[in-house]
Image (cartoon, helix red, strand yellow):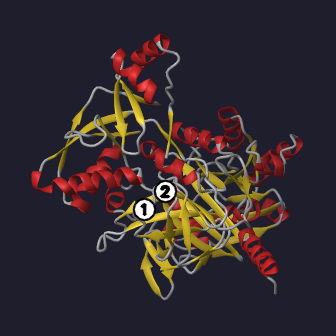
Amino acid sequence: MTATSAVMAGGGVVATQAARRRTFAIISHPDAGKTTLTEKLLLYGGAVAEAGAVHARRNRRAARSDWMDIERRRGISVTSTVLRFEHAGTVFNLLDTPGHRDFSEDTLRVLAAADCAVMLLDAAKGVEPQTLRLFEVARARGIPLITFVNKYDRPGLEPLAMLDHIERVLALTPVAATWPVGIPGDFRGVADRSTGTFHRFTRTAGGSTRAPEELLSAEQASESEGDAWTVAAEELELLDAAGGTLHAEDFTAGRSTPVFFGSAVSNFGVGLLLDALLRLAPPPQPRFSAGGVLRPVDAPFSALVFKVQANMDPRHRDRVAFLRLCSGRFERGMRAVNARTGRPFALAHAHEVFGDDRVVLDEAFPGDVVGVVNATDLRVGDTLYVDEAVVFPPIPTLAPEHFVRVRNLDATRHKQFHRGLTQLAEEGVVHLLRRDRDADPAPVLAGVGPLQFEVAVDRLRNEFGVTVALDATNWTLARRTDAPGAGVLRASRHADVLHGSDGTDLALFTSEFMLDRFVRAHPEVMLDRMLTR
């Protein structure tokens, strides 16, 4: 085989393997049931024998998507989690995201790595503010959405009202893929619109195992469910008359979303959702570089660093960089170039990640997520490549809205204090701001919400042995500016200018009034709401 034919054969393998990948995120408002749905997808995908437990190679071990101590204490997700599993010949990379608004920045980073997203809605509440915010981000990134209306076994909106609500709030065409039989709170099962069959569910103890499911024809469903089926059948006729059919081009372009109804806690409808991900979620596609050039999936290796997490294994004080493969084939031990630094980087310690559980990974393909251990030189937003140089667009992040000064309460832990703050800033847990670029005895922590500060304080104490105090400030919003703008801002005294640890200049205002006043006086100054990493 010639060198050229070998390359072509390798490209064929990459394209074939990429077609087997589905990389998707789950986005939702807090308490919509996201973590529960995540674990039930793992259950139906065969990754776990019971919800909350995983068979990892030969050892059965607990591996929940919420693996951090603070997550388990507070009962909320504060960091994204990567969960990889195979089902029906397809490799799924499930990216579980925090639902709380205060951790929106982490979700933004995850969406940079996803090809599709499941939008999870509470049947009683519909599209909530945080869901809307994340939806707008997904739409801006052109990510197709699959909607799962959860908690239908509780009182909530009627299904037709839910479809109207989705269309009105999101300006998105909802197309029912399944239809609930029984009113909210008296959930019997769902009708599959593609086949006309009825999936009748039976509860299991605690929802820890797959729900027994009975597949009935329309005639059988009418006989067994009576009026509940009659109402559902009439509603389905209305949908058919309205032309509610999902068109692939509208779904891919983000103009329409298939809607599934179910109850994650009871395992109702989860299997149908997983089948839909298998059928509808797109495999990895060519990705635009920062220069607007498409890089095919079978081009030489390239990857985007979308997340950095330290101390996942507290015993070894490790640092894991999560890479989303964009093109080519990854092989453990290969050397790539970091586009930011221009220096080579050895990908020797690479793992397949499942929550906080890791297994050595020898190869991976576009769509896969690789955890690189002890990646001290990698930052969020870095591009790695082999042979053909490429730089992917920076990952957007949100301008902070909360600001506190942080003080070290133990002078003997000075080095640990600054090392911990630097680490948390590099991970994106908080923004670290200083008046002086080189040193500041009273640095500022900035974030989208105050829970980010709680996480930072907790991690400084538990991972770096540092006790800190937080002091309130009077700033309420920030905008990114440039060097000329920073000079004008300082002279105007409308805002304070602090420097981010990544070199970004941020203008901090005490109120919208002060911001508007400055903008009217100096319209030429760059003030950007969206930051990048």
Question: Does the image show residue 175?
Answer: yes
Question: Would residue 245 appear left or right of 90 to someone viewing this image?
Answer: right
Type of amino acid under label 2: Thr
Q: Within 10 angstroms of label 1, few (less than 14), some, or many (20 or more) residues? A: few
Question: Does the image show residue 511?
Answer: no
Q: Residue at x 76, y 56 (%)?
A: 226
Quarter-wise, where is residue 437 in the image? Answer: top left
- Cα separation, mark 2 vs mark 1, equals 9 Å
Quarter-wise, where is residue 209 in the image? Answer: bottom right
The residue to which callout 1 is attached is: 377
Position above or below: 388 against 174: below
Q: Residue at x 64, y 59 (%)?
A: 389
Q: Position of residue 71 (x, y in %)?
A: 36, 58
The residue to which callout 2 is attached is: 341
Q: Residue at x 44, y 59 (%)?
A: 308
Q: Position of residue 378 (x, y in %)?
A: 45, 60
Q: Secondary structure at mark 2?
A: loop
Q: Position of residue 528 (x, y in %)?
A: 51, 30
Q: Secondary structure at mark 1?
A: loop
Question: Would residue 102 appear left or right of 86 to someone viewing this image?
Answer: left
Q: Nearer the viewer, residue 173 or 464?
A: 464
Question: Do the residues bearing badges 2 and 1 touch, measured as CB atoms within 8 Å?
Answer: yes
